Image (cartoon, coloured by chain):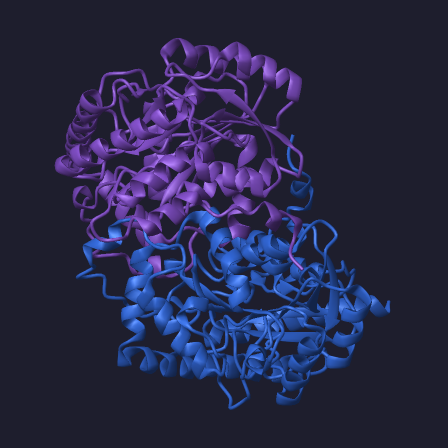
Chain colours: A blue, B purple
Amino acid sequence: MFSERIERLSGSLIREILSLTQRPGMISFAGGLPASHMMPCFDFTQLPAELRQYGPSEGEPILREKIAEHVRQLGIQATAEQVLVLSGSQQALDLVAKLFIDPGTPMLVEAPTYLAALQNFKLFGADLHELPLSAAGIDPEQLRQTAQRTRPACCYLIPTFQNPSGYCYSPETRAAVSQVLDDLMLPLIEDEPYRELAYDAVERRPLCAGLKQAPFIYCGSFSKTATPGLRVGYLVASPKLMPYLIKLKQAADLHTNRVGQYVLAKWLDTPDYHAHIATIRQYYRQQRDTMIDALNRHCQELAEWETPPGGLFIWARLRKPLDTREILKTTMARNVAFMPGEPFFATPVDTAGCIRLNFSHASADAVEQGIAIIKDALQDAFVNLKS
Amino acid sequence: MFSERIERLSGSLIREILSLTQRPGMISFAGGLPASHMMPCFDFTQLPAELRQYGPSEGEPILREKIAEHVRQLGIQATAEQVLVLSGSQQALDLVAKLFIDPGTPMLVEAPTYLAALQNFKLFGADLHELPLSAAGIDPEQLRQTAQRTRPACCYLIPTFQNPSGYCYSPETRAAVSQVLDDLMLPLIEDEPYRELAYDAVERRPLCAGLKQAPFIYCGSFSKTATPGLRVGYLVASPKLMPYLIKLKQAADLHTNRVGQYVLAKWLDTPDYHAHIATIRQYYRQQRDTMIDALNRHCQELAEWETPPGGLFIWARLRKPLDTREILKTTMARNVAFMPGEPFFATPVDTAGCIRLNFSHASADAVEQGIAIIKDALQDAFVNLKS
């Protein structure tokens, strides 16, 4: 009765875990929600009457200009004509899948990578090939060899404060990866929802800024810096990709809601914007440090991790390979949730031995309590492993 | 480089014509825009702070309840759990295509039918079979035979004030079509963006309300009654389809913008809503009558048409088969635009001999002038046909 792709339609494990974390008294490091009380209040007064009518599929001209200006400051030479406003940057995944993927189309992704990206690319039947990720990024030489071997339609990367790992590609990796993509003329999908959540001084130049000829789609979000409830994101793409992307956007939902685009464009134009970014960086940096401190005190012998220079997540690698979904069951019984690492890999793994910890949401007390409970669960599991 | 479906990605002819109609002095009967000055002003004050955060993929609970209440009044026995709020009802076409269509999947559509539906279904590779449409609707017996012969995955119908035809299925057709769908357990996609724009007393009971067992997806819009710029629409589906549709919605854009959902839900709860519907009906009825009057005076010998009991369009059938895209070129040279009939058919036709005239937009003077120019163009074309 249904299409073949429905057999590949996976529910989001995050979604299931999140619904469980609604229980009262639950300490959750599972989600990736920005802190509600840190979000700006937009000005919804004096909305132009014309916003009520249908708008352009490409997006509001004032917002497209602001976005083009922003990405030019990052080193991506783009005009407003290369900007497509989206109903959240999640929509970029849908458009990318439609543009590139037939059942069996090879595509490159990081291992681990963003769950919803895997969900979308698999839905369209992509043959996903993984590029193992370390704290400095993917290995450029491995990228070249894997691409030459598998002939992918495109490559999906999250170089800055990655989800789930929090990793940020080193300057050397950034330059080398862009070079390989240019050499192979391999289209790059660069996803950067977290780039403004920077807590330490690190290089964040987009890979797209280093490209000389490879086609690109650069995806950006306002959900982490402003408010996700508005559902306004964007992509910036090579000129020759734009006509296809605009038609795909039009077919998907005609255009993005205009009120959200308008209030956002106005806000980006005020000093409030820069002040707000500084405020949330300060806040999230403190949150991160609190969790790193708790991990240092409780979990040194059980796992290792990097201090993420930005983003919302810590990726803890257990010192022994375990199915972290089993650990989750133990901690959930004590009202503590985190994201098991297994679903973040394109190729099914039995024991990822990694967990994702979100630090933006819980209070300092909850972090202390929750990490101690995770420690207990890991200790027990390690003992059982030996016996 | 691209997926196979991109070869099937058509631009919207409407889009191209609409961009030409932006020229100053142009009289356009081409688009289907609701009248901007007739749209309500929503109350964007006192928005709850929680709307800033990510929301449920299914939609805001208060809006889902209102929608369920609305469709129950239409005779569709549905709960709020069967409602999925969408980023405009256009998104239903994308989700339907993903749910049902693989390349080559048979599907039934009216002839003519909604352009963007054709665009989406073709993009996913549907093998479209047409059900010829008359003023009373499709032929139920032909539906049965075509369905038995082609074994379609689903059937897409717009029974009430159809786009492009303005036709409204008769009560007898409604009952018979629902019966056939039930007999064959054929899933129905019923699209009703225009149902509240009713100018004459006609039966508008949804086909879905007449189903006893066939699966259904009922698609509704607020773009014609409220404001399209908010991009909030919905679908109501059989319980067993919901889990798939919710996951597809989540993959597409996580959820619909929450501010739009909220202000709409509040507005639907005020007396303003019903007063507004009465006002726009009165306005559009007058607009329709003005155009019918102009057609009666100028075009009786060149074409025939029904007075549409609702919606935004008149479908004029020329007395001789002509390629109406050629007629359009002639009228465009005199600054008058309409929609040629050819693109509204799933199977390419050389000479539809039909044109779609939108009556919601132009002033009475412009209607008089524009219809006279169309008359001239038709007369010339008829003369050339003879010679």
* Quadrant location, the N terminus of chain A: top right
Q: Where A320 falls versus B253 (above or below)?
A: below
Instruction: Decide which of B59, B227 is in the foreground and name it.
Output: B227
Instruction: Decide which of A323, B84 is in the foreground and name it.
Output: B84
Residue furthest left in the image: B365
B207 with respect to A189 (left or right): left
Q: In the image, what residue occupies the spot 17% across and 38% down?
A: B366
Q: Which quarter of the picture shows residue A79?
A: bottom left
- Numbered disc total: 0
Q: In the image, what residue occupies the spot 64% across and 46% down?
A: A9
Q: Give coordinates of residue A7: x percent, y percent.
A: 69, 42
Q: Which quarter of the picture shows residue A66?
A: bottom left
B245 with respect to B272 (left or right): right
Asked if residue A357 shows in the view, the reply is yes
Q: In the image, what residue occupies the spot 56% across and 77% down?
A: A208
A332 with respect to B82 (left or right): right
Instruction: Decide which of B116, A382 is in the foreground and name it.
Output: B116
Q: Give coordinates of residue A314: x percent, y percent.
A: 59, 75
Q: Give coordinates of residue A163: x percent, y percent.
A: 59, 70
Q: Give coordinates of residue B380: x percent, y percent.
A: 31, 30
